[in-house]
């Protein structure tokens, strides 16, 4: 039983060997404080966000790519493992992807969480390595590839060659920060409060960072901050592009900084191979064209960018002997 887990801030995606992706649901758990039991996880729990009575807590136990609530994360992972494995006697080996600049303390928290959730053995793999494997790139060659993985909590930029990370950067800007920017923009411009679920829908429908049009619009509903009453209004692509501009520019600056400090021979490879976008942020309208325009390097999204990292974690067991770094074995004896 080998399981690959993309433990994302926004979504958890699980893959199993040759079966590929077997689960893709939001990283949300609902917990009943009175009965001390898990009410729901994933899609069902996501629908409860902001709508629960006081005794039921619906929350995202991960923030900025790392665990913010150990116990809730353990419960959530355990429930997801049961969903895909059932109650089997054999405990699975699990490989979990982590951001490039995660600390030792954060690594230990993830390892212990997975062990307590029922793993036989735990491996960690860096997100950029997993993303390239999942995108079908041969990372074992002496050829530079750059990947930009834009997740819910972080954006990782990494140059990979010969199975190892040569140069990388990680910034805490991702889908959640973009949602928060949309919430702030609507609040400041229209004095209307909207939830992050609404902001997420607006981001998916209207974000176009390359050539936004005033003709593409959407109706959003929320609460009037002046009188507390319900209200609705119409927003267009230009407004949303303005709202998310600072976040998008931070991601492009991170790519530029990595390219600036990469050895010239690898930079030449990158010019030929281009920049690969993975993660949910790769789906933002016009992002690849904007990066190509600003950095003068061709950029394209991977096929199924949301699933790339999870596919890579599932396939990572095939690379146990060839990956130079970014793949770390954890001894069972340390975490009994």
Image (tube, rainbow, N blue to C red):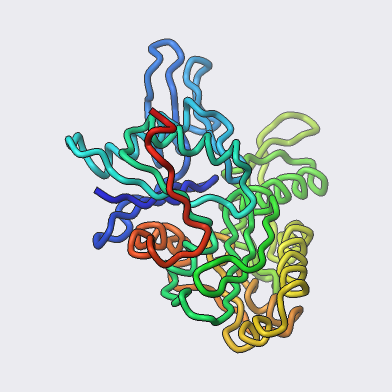
Quadrant assignment, res 260: bottom right
- Identify the residue shown where x is 38% and y is 12%: 35
309 in relation to 224, above or below: below
- Identify the residue shown where x is 66% and y is 87%: 268
Residue 101 placement (x, y as % from top left) = 64, 51
Quadrant assignment, res 273: bottom right
Residue 92 placement (x, y as % from top left) = 28, 43
Which part of the image, by quadrant, shows the C terminus? top left
Residue 334 placement (x, y as % from top left) = 44, 33
- 66 to the left or right of 80: right
- Identify the residue shown where x is 73% and y is 36%: 224
68 in relation to 317, above or below: above
Residue nearest the observer in this picture, 55 or 79: 79
Residue located farthest toward the top when viewing the structure as drawn: 34
Tell me, yes or no, if residue 146 can be seen here.
yes
43 in relation to 266, above or below: above
How many numbered badges does the structure rendering display?
A: 0
- 89 to the left or right of 132: left
Residue located farthest toward the left when viewing the structure as drawn: 89
Residue nearest the observer in this picture, 117 or 278: 117
Tell me, yes or no, if residue 211 can be seen here.
no
- Identify the residue shown where x is 40% and y is 40%: 331
Residue 271 placement (x, y as % from top left) = 65, 86
């Amino acid at each position: 039983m080998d399981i690959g887990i993309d433990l994302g801030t926004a979504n958890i995606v699980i893959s199993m060997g040759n079966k590929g992706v077997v689960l893709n649901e939001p990283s949300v758990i609902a917990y009943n404080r009175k009965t001390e039991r898990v009410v729901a996880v994933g899609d069902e729990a996501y629908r409860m966000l902001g709508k629960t009575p006081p005794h039921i807590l619906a929350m995202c136990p991960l923030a900025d790519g790392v665990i913010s609530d150990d116990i809730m994360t353990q419960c959530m992972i355990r429930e997801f493992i049961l969903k895909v494995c059932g109650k089997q006697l054999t405990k699975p080996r699990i490989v979990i992807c982590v951001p490039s600049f995660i600390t030792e303390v954060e690594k230990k928290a993830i390892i212990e969480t997975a062990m307590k959730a029922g793993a036989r053995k735990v491996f960690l793999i860096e997100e950029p390595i997993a993303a390239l494997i999942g995108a079908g790139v041969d990372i074992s060659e002496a050829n530079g590839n750059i990947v930009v993985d834009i997740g819910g909590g972080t954006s990782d930029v990494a140059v990979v060659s010969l199975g190892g990370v040569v140069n990388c950067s990680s910034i805490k800007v991702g889908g959640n920060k973009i949602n928060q920017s949309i919430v702030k923009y609507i609040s400041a411009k229209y004095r209307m409060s909207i939830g992050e679920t609404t902001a997420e829908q607006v981001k998916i429908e209207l974000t176009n960072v390359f050539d936004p049009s005033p003709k593409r619009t959407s109706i959003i509903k929320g609460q009037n901050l002046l009188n507390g009453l319900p209200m609705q209004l119409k927003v267009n692509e230009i407004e949303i592009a303005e709202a998310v501009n600072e976040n998008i520019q931070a991601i492009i600056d991170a790519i530029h900084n990595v390219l600036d400090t990469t050895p010239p021979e690898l930079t030449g490879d990158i010019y030929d191979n281009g920049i690969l976008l993975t993660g949910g942020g790769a789906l933002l309208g016009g992002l690849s064209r904007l990066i190509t325009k600003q950095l003068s390097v061709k950029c394209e999204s991977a096929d199924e960018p949301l699933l790339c990292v999870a596919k890579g974690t599932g396939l990572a067991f095939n690379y146990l002997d060839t990956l130079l770094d970014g793949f770390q074995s954890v001894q069972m004896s340390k975490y009994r």
